Image (tube, rainbow, N blue to C red):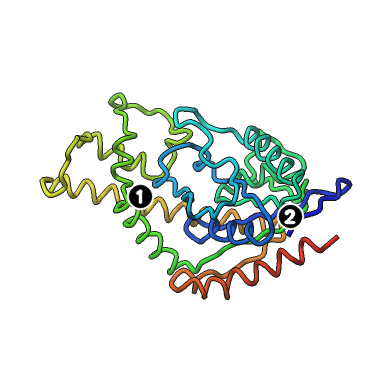
Amino acid sequence: MTVCMNQSRKEKVVVIMGATGTGKSRLSVDLATRFSGEIINSDKIQLYNGLEIATNQITIPERCGVPHHLLGVIPLDEGEVSASEFRSLASRSISEIASRGKLPIIAGGSNSFIHTLLVEHFDPESNPFSSMPSISSELRYDCCFLWVDVSVSVLFHYLSKRVDQMMESGMFEELAGFYKPRHSGSTTTLSGIHKTIGIPEFDRYFELYPPEKNDKVCEWDSARKAAYEEAVQAVKDNTWQLAKKQVERIMKLRCSGWEIQRLDATASLRSSREVWDKTVLEESIKTVKNFLLKD
């Protein structure tokens, strides 16, 4: 399906939201392949080029040939990407995608960046999710919001298991290769890629046990094994805290007038592709079709 854009109207964009691990990337690719779409990453950590396991970047095979924008484009040694910079970069991507008759699909877990990109009037000095929220319901695009949600208990156990799988897939070695000793007692505020869950947790581990070549787990003493397990548990705890914060922010956007459709992906997280297609994808396709046909 080719998307026809009327220049006198707001550009249509699909926005896929949700906590980490719920299937946002999966749904974005599924919809992009069916609606001639291109995907714009809205996860501030996945902007950086590197640490693909720790940042949970979608792999090349998983992208199914769909163009991805603002994914792994910032060098690791660059600092924080500001909200203003993201708004400029993502706006340009939306315009370029729409000019080719394609559907822009925004997918990612950084709800502050999503708000920054979509609102008509952006205040770089304001935090929309602070104790005094300043969430705007005036949007500069015609948006179709899809929220991939999973029940608390199922998501909690899934994220714990996913961290274990990430460690088995090489996350520990990835973090060891990235580690750089800091000055003792340093209180430098983390920024940019250093905010990635896994880096600060394992920095504390590597301060005690610096990375070594030919390091063999079977040769670790009990203290080192305990320190490793403590770091892994910290990654799990902080991943869960992130997921809760992401859902809280989506709820705040909903309460502020954003028309966000919730998709219950709980069953699909524990089951086959067929369950995903039935419970999440079919409803999403129907919603996007109606959205694109709407004047």
Q: Residue at x 58, y 40 (%)?
A: 70
Residue 144 sits in quarter: bottom right
Q: Residue 234, how many percent across, how many down?
A: 33, 49
Q: In front: mark 1 or mark 2?
A: 2
Q: Left or right? Give the position of 252 relative to 229.
A: right
Residue type at numbered disc 2: Cys
In the current view of this chain or complex, which residue is farthest to the right? 8
Quadrant of the snapshot with the N terminus: bottom right
Q: Residue 59, how many percent across, how many down?
A: 46, 50
Q: Left or right? Give the position of 223 relative to 30.
A: left
What residue is shown with label 1?
A: 235
Specify few, some or many for label 2: CA neighbours under 10 Å numbering under 14, 14-19, or 20 or more: many
Q: Residue 45, how many percent across, how many down?
A: 49, 41
Q: Left or right? Give the position of 61 relative to 210.
A: right
Q: Is residue 269 above or below residue 97?
A: below
Q: Earlier in the sequence, mark 1 or mark 2?
A: 2
